[in-house]
Image (cartoon, rainbow, N blue to C red):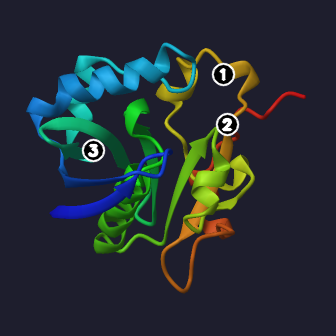
């Protein structure tokens, strides 16, 4: 999909930009890695490798303007009812222009098309997700989180991310019934 957006910079000047939002391709791997690993170097995101990106490129949606990657995010399926919004990143020069919101909305649309009940995320910016209809939840109430990601995280023993969830249908899986307990694992808790 291609969108023409009227955006404003923090200084208030309007920018008209042709924003293209689409599913990622193999050719997007290196720009995505550059964006994500830039944040990872600051301890804000998990670093990704070319191998991981190659395996998971179909999870990603990208946003380009003027041929330059300005945002990305992935929808990673965990159960037949839930998926995680992850690796959400916006070019630091393009923050506050609504690109993150547009990427998350595209991922939510993909989740709806796949008839998922809910999407969740782990974040350091719960306010962003709150404005998009997500609610904070106890991380232990969520379906299995990829242990391979958690185990290699430098913050594994003192995780400080906040779990958020958004219901996508009338009978959301906010409280997972007992029949799904085999899908749950206890995730690292925040140390205080």
In the rendered view, tell whether residue 121 sits above or below residue 191: below
Mark 2 neighbour class, 10 Å CA radius: few under 14, some 14 to 19, many 20 or more: some
| Number of numbered discs visible in the structure rendering | 3
Determine the secondary structure under disc 2.
loop
**Which badge, 3 or 1, is on the more N-terminal residue?**
3
Name the residue rendered at 53%, 17% in the picture. Answer: 152
Q: Quadrant of the C terminus?
A: top right
Which of pointers 3 and 1 indicates the residue nearer the eye?
3
Question: Which residue does the numbered mark 3 point to in the structure image?
Answer: 60
Q: Which numbered disc flags the more N-terminal residue, 3 or 2?
A: 3
> Image quadrant of residue 142?
bottom right
Among all residues in the image, which is located at the extreme right? 192
Label 1: how many residues lie within 10 Å, few (<14), some (14-19) or many (20+)? some
Q: Nearer the viewer, residue 129 or 50?
A: 129
Mark number displayed over residue 156 = 1
Which residue is at the front of the view, 64 or 14?
14
* Residue holding disc 2: 161
State how far apart marks 1 and 2 are (Cα).
Answer: 10 Å
In the picture provided, is 159 more to the left or to the right than 11?
right
| Disc 3 from disc 2: Cα separation | 21 Å
Q: Residue 167 location in percent, x, y?
A: 55, 72
Which residue is at the front of the view, 70 or 119? 70
Q: Earlier in the sequence, mark 1 or mark 2?
A: 1
- Can residue 183 be seen in the rendering of this structure? yes
Q: Could you tell me residue 169's position as x and y percent? A: 49, 81
Asked if one can make out residue 77 in the rendered structure from this viewpoint, the answer is no
Q: Look at the picture and state if 173 lies above or below 94.
A: below
**Quarter of the image containing the N terminus?**
bottom left
Which quadrant of the figure has residue 7? bottom left
């Amino acid at each position: 999909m291609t969108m023409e957006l009227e955006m404003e910079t923090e200084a208030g000047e309007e920018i008209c930009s042709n924003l293209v939002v689409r599913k990622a391709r193999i050719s997007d791997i290196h720009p995505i890695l550059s964006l994500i690993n830039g944040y990872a170097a600051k301890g804000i995101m998990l670093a990704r490798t070319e191998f991981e990106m190659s395996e998971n490129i179909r999870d990603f949606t990208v946003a380009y303007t003027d041929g330059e990657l300005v945002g990305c995010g992935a929808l990673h399926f965990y159960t037949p009812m839930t998926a995680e919004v992850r690796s959400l990143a916006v070019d630091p020069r393009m923050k506050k222009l609504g690109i993150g919101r547009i990427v998350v909305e595209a991922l939510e649309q993909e989740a709806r098309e796949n008839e998922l009940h809910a999407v969740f995320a782990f974040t350091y910016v719960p306010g962003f997700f709150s404005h998009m209809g997500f609610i904070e939840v106890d991380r232990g109430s969520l379906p299995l989180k990829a242990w391979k990601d958690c185990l290699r995280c430098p913050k594994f023993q003192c995780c400080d991310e906040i779990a958020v969830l958004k219901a996508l249908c009338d009978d959301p899986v906010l409280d997972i019934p007992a029949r799904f307990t085999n899908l749950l694992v206890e995730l690292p808790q925040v140390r205080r």
